[in-house]
Amino acid sequence: MKNFKIGGVPEHFNFPWYLALKEKSFQKQNINLRWIDYPGGTGQMNKALRNKEIDMAVILTEGIVRDIIKGNEAKIVQVFVKSPLIWGIHVAKNSDYHTVSDLKGTNAAISRFGSGSHLMAFINAKNHNWDINSDLKFKVIDTLEGALQGLPEGKGDYFMWEKFTTKPFVDQGIFRRVGNCPTPWPCFVIAVRNDILENEPEAVKVILDIINAETRKFKSIPDIDVLLSNRYQQKLEDVQEWLSLTEWSRKNLTDVELEEVQNRLLELKLIDSKVPSEKIIAKI
């Protein structure tokens, strides 16, 4: 039995992994795959990959691309979710800010530097023609839980997180959503450490084959919307909307898509230079 550890956010996007693990699909192929939740998101997973705490990660595209360029010895082996991630832009219920424009020059609450909430704040700023040097400020709050507690207390002025995950807290009146910011590329990819790719390429391929079979049938599972609604405490109509917008993938990131990510990161001064695609993408 080969042992692997994979990390991901504890959100509805990753429910296919839960189902495959529950069905013991990996064990049937002599693979003991252990899932580890990372509520801190992409920045937390990048650190775990670097420290060899996990072998693989289901991670935000822009976050892992930037970290690989900055020395993370891993590669992207496949896109997991090809549709954009829709980031909600949130303020505390009693905040004086009511539009995205109001947030210019205020503190963005982020899970950590290098995380999706950090990088997408730059994308949002650019979308609104803000000066990224003077109009962007940050306050680290670690996790979604940290934002739920911190924003009402004035620790950060706004918080960007996937809008369906935060929708229950908008409904409860903890957050108020003032806008959305979709990613300009496929949102989640699967990244694997280079040493694992070198030593266990066949096992990695088996893992990808299993999860791809799961995502291929995912939307046709009877009452999957009800199951997701109950598990993630979301309204049924929100889950149904999310399912209609979300598309999983079984292909890798294209050179064109990677070029777009690198161009944006370079434009926003989040990387110093671009690198060839073979340093970021691995063909399995």
Image (cartoon, rainbow, N blue to C red):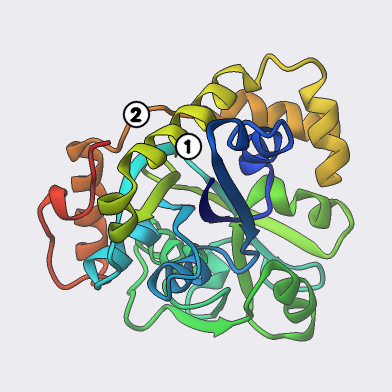
Q: Residue 46 location in percent, x, y?
A: 43, 68
Q: Is the C-beta separation of discs 1 and 2 under 8 Å? A: no
Residue 243 visible in the snapshot: yes
Q: Residue 276 location in percent, x, y?
A: 10, 53
Location of mark 1 (residue): 207
Relative to 15, say whether 212 is above or below: above
Q: Residue 33 location in percent, x, y?
A: 58, 48
Relative to 258, say whether 241 is above or below: above
Residue at 34%, 47% (x, y): give it. Answer: 200
Question: Counting residues from the N terminus, which is met first, the one under dot 1 or under dot 2?
Answer: 1
Q: What SS does tag 2 mark?
A: loop
Question: In the visual, does 107 lie left or right of 279?
Answer: right
Query: What is the crowding at mark 1: few (fewer than 14 residues within 10 Å), some, or many (at least 20)?
Result: some
Q: What SS does tag 1 mark?
A: helix
Which is more foreground, mark 1 or mark 2? Answer: 1
Q: Residue 174 location in percent, x, y?
A: 83, 65
264 or 63, nearer to the observer? 63
Residue at 84%, 42% (x, y): give it. Answer: 231
Question: In the visual, does 24 lie left or right of 2?
Answer: right
Residue at 68%, 85% (x, y): give it. Answer: 155
Query: What is the crowding at mark 2: few (fewer than 14 residues within 10 Å), some, or many (at least 20)?
Result: some
Residue 251, numbered label: 2
